[in-house]
Image (cartoon, rainbow, N blue to C red):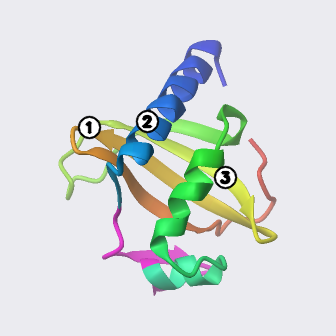
């Protein structure tokens, strides 16, 4: 990752910490996630990672570092009609690699994806 991108990730993570502590964080849990070549609910994807309550994800987000970031990209989903930056991370949780996609809105931090990574090979960048 380029230095400019690393600085952006570092700044984003600091904003995440601040917003999470204020309770301004939201999980998009009403969608289907592709996990291991089939679709499951976002809640089931959390259970598959060993996370019993969706609120627990914010503890893991607080532990993220810029080294966990694998990509910064724009949201290309036309259904959401957003053109904002997406921060994509991979982190080991309960001996599984989690894929985490976060973005920022005026309302706070939004977690769009939090599920087991469907690609093999761990946290390679």
Residue behind mark 2:
18
The residue at 31%/76% (across/down) is: 30
**Magenta stretch?**
27-42
Q: Where is 114 relative to 82, above or below? A: below
Among the 4 quarters of the image, the one containing residue 29 = bottom left
Q: Earlier in the sequence, mark 2 or mark 3?
A: 2
Q: Position of residue 98 (x, y in %)?
A: 65, 63
Q: Position of residue 91 (x, y in %)?
A: 70, 54
Q: Which residue is drawn at 57% across and 38% down?
A: 71
Q: Which of marks 1 and 2 is nearer the N terminus?
A: 2
Query: Marks 1 and 2: which is nearer the front?
Result: 2
Q: What element carries label 1?
A: loop
Residues 11 and 119: in front is 11
99 sits to left or right of 121: left
State which mark lies toward you, 3 or 1.
3
Question: Helix, strand or loop at disc 2?
Answer: helix
Residue at image mark 1: 83
61 over 104 or under it: above or below: below
Q: How far, Cα to Cα, is label 2 from label 3?
A: 21 Å
- As displayed, is residue 74 above or below residue 119? above
């Amino acid at each position: 990752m380029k230095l400019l991108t690393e600085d952006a990730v570092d700044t984003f993570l600091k904003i995440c910490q601040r917003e999470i502590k204020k309770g301004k964080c939201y999980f998009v849990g009403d969608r289907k996630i592709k996990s291991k070549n089939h679709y499951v609910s976002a809640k089931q994807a959390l259970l598959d990672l060993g996370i019993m309550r969706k609120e627990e994800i914010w503890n893991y987000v607080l532990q993220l570092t810029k080294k966990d970031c694998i990509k910064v990209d724009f949201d290309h989903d036309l259904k959401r009609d957003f053109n904002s930056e997406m921060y994509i991370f991979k982190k080991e949780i309960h001996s599984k690699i989690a894929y985490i996609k976060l973005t920022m809105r005026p309302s706070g931090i939004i977690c769009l994806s939090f599920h087991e990574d469907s690609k093999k090979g761990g946290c390679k960048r």
